[in-house]
Image (tube, rainbow, N blue to C red):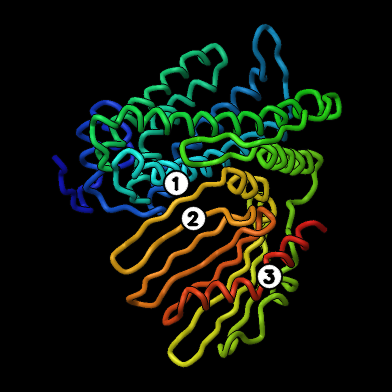
Amino acid sequence: MTTDIQPAQTPSLAERVKNILLSPKAEWDRVNGESASVGGLYTGYVVILAAIGPVCSAIGAILFGWGGFGISIHPSIISVIVSSIVSYALSLASVYVLALIIDALAPTFDGEKNPTQALKVAVYSSTASWVAGVFGILPALGPLAIVGLYSLYLLYLGLPRLMKAPEAKALPYTAVVILAAIVLAIVIGAVMTPIRMMGGLGAGQFGASPAVSGNVQVGGASVDLGKLQAASEQIKAQADAAKAGGAAPMGVAPEILKGLLPASLNGFTRGDVSSESTSAGGVGASHAEAQYTKGDSHFSIEITDMAAMGGVGAMASALNVNSSKETATGYEKVATINGRMTTEEYDRASKSGKFGVMAGGRIMVEAKGDGVSIDDLKAAVAAVGPDKIEALTKH
């Protein structure tokens, strides 16, 4: 039975971790009744617990090195930091991708699509594996990390409760999601291995990675292996530059992005325009934005280049995730069109929504507004020109 939970009763981080590990059935019922948001789940839970593994592994690598089977490699501190940052970023991204897959697969197993509930499942079922990351601090304790497999049981319990799948289909639903998680783990491992090797022996001592191609089907999703390898090499190149002391990639200059914003569009007049660039924590970014109005209708166009996270963006595109949700008055979609990840939301009652395209694997062009049609928003993104954006990322 679902228990209604008032916001004031939401447990603390420590209580949630203890409850989900020790009394998971009751805690899943509690989670089911809670309101949540992507930002709240990430800032209050994911960003904290997902850091356990990278931080503890970094400490263990600095003190004891990387290795196995009697071989130990002692990497530089910079290499360890770069490796940990990339691992952390991939963990944050993989949770969201897994949630998209959970949501997309729900109808296949007679469940109900719900992006927020799917993210809850992905987040809270990962608790055991995140906590098990503490064993990375001491190589001798490494085998104990197997307790992280308890997350599979948490997933099995959470899927039918939150995604409303019949108990009889909980096992096959779990099995397919686990397969998707394994693919994500392979991707993360493929990215992290060359980065660790760079730290210990230098990338130049290893031959180029053998080329891979083709697609792997995971449920209803198609994973492009060639794109995954390209994304891996992109992240590797960024890590190599950071190790050599290079500055964080700043991406396309904000003034250039600003120049892509159309002066007018289908009767809409451009108002305020802004642009900026920043570098924080080794992550460079540039941004440009403009406001457009026509009578009571208005929308904005934003162009954001997360240059230092380009490999992660390219990886998301390679996963070819497609999902959709219908509401009483609108819809939400995530799709891969012409090799670009797109997001689309629209409410016909309020005539409000947003449409975004990831171009070049790292630059998001998004239009969002009120009193407009979805065609207006798509035309706004098209006017910026994803093709022009991708040409800029190649220079």
The residue carrying pointer 2 sits among few (fewer than 14), some (14 to 19) or many (20 or more) residues within 10 Å by Cα, namely some
Horizontal side of residue 5 vs 329, given as left or right: left
Task: Give the secondary structure at mark 2.
Answer: strand
Q: Amino acid at mark 1?
A: Leu
Q: Position of residue 75 (x, y in %)?
A: 73, 25
Horizontal side of residue 290 vs 112, given as left or right: right
Horizontal side of residue 272 vs 38, given as left or right: right
Counting residues from the start of the chain, the first of labels 1 and 2 encountered is: 1
Q: Nearer the viewer, residue 127 or 100?
A: 100
**Mark number for residue 385?**
3
* Residue sitting farthest toward the bottom: 295
Could you tell me how far apart the alpha carbons at marks 3 and 2 are, in whole angstroms?
A: 20 Å
Q: Please name the residue shown 39% across and 46% down the image.
A: 103
Task: Give the secondary structure at mark 1.
Answer: helix
Counting residues from the start of the chain, the first of labels 3 and 1 encountered is: 1
Q: Please name the residue shown 61% across and 61% down the image.
A: 364
Q: Please name the residue shown 23% across and 28% down the image.
A: 23
Seen in the picture, residue 92 relative to 83 is either above or below; the reply is below
Q: Nearer the viewer, residue 177 or 94?
A: 177
Seen in the picture, residue 338 relative to 54 is either above or below; the reply is below
Seen in the picture, residue 233 relative to 135 is either above or below; the reply is below
Q: Position of residue 135 (x, y in %)?
A: 49, 20
Q: Which residue position is annotated with label 2? A: 334
Could you tell me how far apart the alpha carbons at marks 1 and 2 are, in whole angstroms?
A: 9 Å
Could you tell me how far apart the alpha carbons at marks 3 and 1 are, in whole angstroms?
A: 27 Å
**Mark number for residue 100?**
1
Quadrant in the picture for the C terminus: bottom right
Quadrant in the picture for the N terminus: top left
Counting residues from the start of the chain, the first of labels 3 and 2 encountered is: 2
The residue carrying pointer 1 sits among few (fewer than 14), some (14 to 19) or many (20 or more) residues within 10 Å by Cα, namely many
